[in-house]
């Protein structure tokens, strides 16, 4: 897995929307119930049930998106004992859930520090230039649009799945697709693991992001017929859908129009 860390691509203004999205994702993550780690036994189960209840309310669920209808039963956050032993209690939801809105809220929910930090790194490296080309408001609309299209793309490929879909990766994949189209020759400083060593190279964006997309495509094709648990929890079709959506929307929303030259001496981000 290659890891981008920096691109030398100056912008005309501070990327406040990109920074705001990163901050929002971090804040939501800090407010998310913690997943079981070192805790064991009943306390671990209680944590897991609270987390499942949180996901049931705020995450996207493919079958809900496809049928535009919430599931009849959802975790309540409480534990109980049934015929199969201790587990999370399921009941009719006490909250109103809009499946369409869940495709939006799911973009700000992450399943762990690695999930969060990996997504935020890609957004930090590539988001500022796409924001600079679009302008702040259009960029925000673009970002949200990519994320929601990615969620629905994944749902259509997994119509009957009740696995939760969380994370900003679909929206960020849209940013990557736009960047690949706007700045294909821009060189990106990248960490490349080779066995136990790590080398640093500058790679043209079109090769780096093209390689990323190919990996997602083949991993997604290999996962057909499985579920997210068998895919290691990675929603490859959300990544593919977001990337393609980004390339299409950047054209439809006029983002490919040439920008004015950056001011001499303008700070780089």
Image (cartoon, helix red, strand yellow):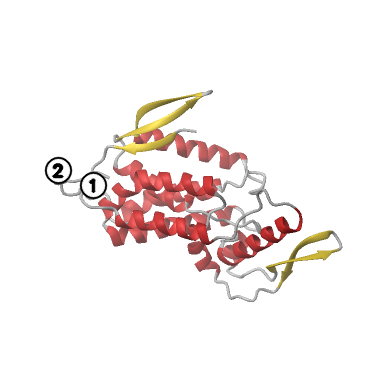
Q: Left or right: where does residue 73 sit relative to residue 100?
A: right
Looking at the image, residue 10 lies above or below residue 157: above
Residue projecting furthest to the left: 264
Q: Quadrant of residue 204?
A: top left
Looking at the picture, how far across and down is residue 177, in whole percent?
39, 45
In the picture of the structure, the residue carrying the numbered disc 1 is 11
Looking at the picture, how far across and down is residue 229, in whole percent?
66, 47
Label 2, label 1: how many angstroms apart (C-alpha)? 11 Å
Looking at the image, residue 143 lies above or below residue 8: below
In the picture of the structure, the residue carrying the numbered disc 2 is 265
Image quadrant holding the C terminus, namely top left
What residue lies at 23% left-to-right and 47% top-to-bottom? 11
Looking at the picture, how far across and down is residue 265, in whole percent?
14, 43
Looking at the picture, how far across and down is residue 124, in whole percent?
37, 47
Looking at the image, residue 92 lies above or below residue 39: below
Q: Secondary structure at mark 2?
A: loop
């Amino acid at each position: 897995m290659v890891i981008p860390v920096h691109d030398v691509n100056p912008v005309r203004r501070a990327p406040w929307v990109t920074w705001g999205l990163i901050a929002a994702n971090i804040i939501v993550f800090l407010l998310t119930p913690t997943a079981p780690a070192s805790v064991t036994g009943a306390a671990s189960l209680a944590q897991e049930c609270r987390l499942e209840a949180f996901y049931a309310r705020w995450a996207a669920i493919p079958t809900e998106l496809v049928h535009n209808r919430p599931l009849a039963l959802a975790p309540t956050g409480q534990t109980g004992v049934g015929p199969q032993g201790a587990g999370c209690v399921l009941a009719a939801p006490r909250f109103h859930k809009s499946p369409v809105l869940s495709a939006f809220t799911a973009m700000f929910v992450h399943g762990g520090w690695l999930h969060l930090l990996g997504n935020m790194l890609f957004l930090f490296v590539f988001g500022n230039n796409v924001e600079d080309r679009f302008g702040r408001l259009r960029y925000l609309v673009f970002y949200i649009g990519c994320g929601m299209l990615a969620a629905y793309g994944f749902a259509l490929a997994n119509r009957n799945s009740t696995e939760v879909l969380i994370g900003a990766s679909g929206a960020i994949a849209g940013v990557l697709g736009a960047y690949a189209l706007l700045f294909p020759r821009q060189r990106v400083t990248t960490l490349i693991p080779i066995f136990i060593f790590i080398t640093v190279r500058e790679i043209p964006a079109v090769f780096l992001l093209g390689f990323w997309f190919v990996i997602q495509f083949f991993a997604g094709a290999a996962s057909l017929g499985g579920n997210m648990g068998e895919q290691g929890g990675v929603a490859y079709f959300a990544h593919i859908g977001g990337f393609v959506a980004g390339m299409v929307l950047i054209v439809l929303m006029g983002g490919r129009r040439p920008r004015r030259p950056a001011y001499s001496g303008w700070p780089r981000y």
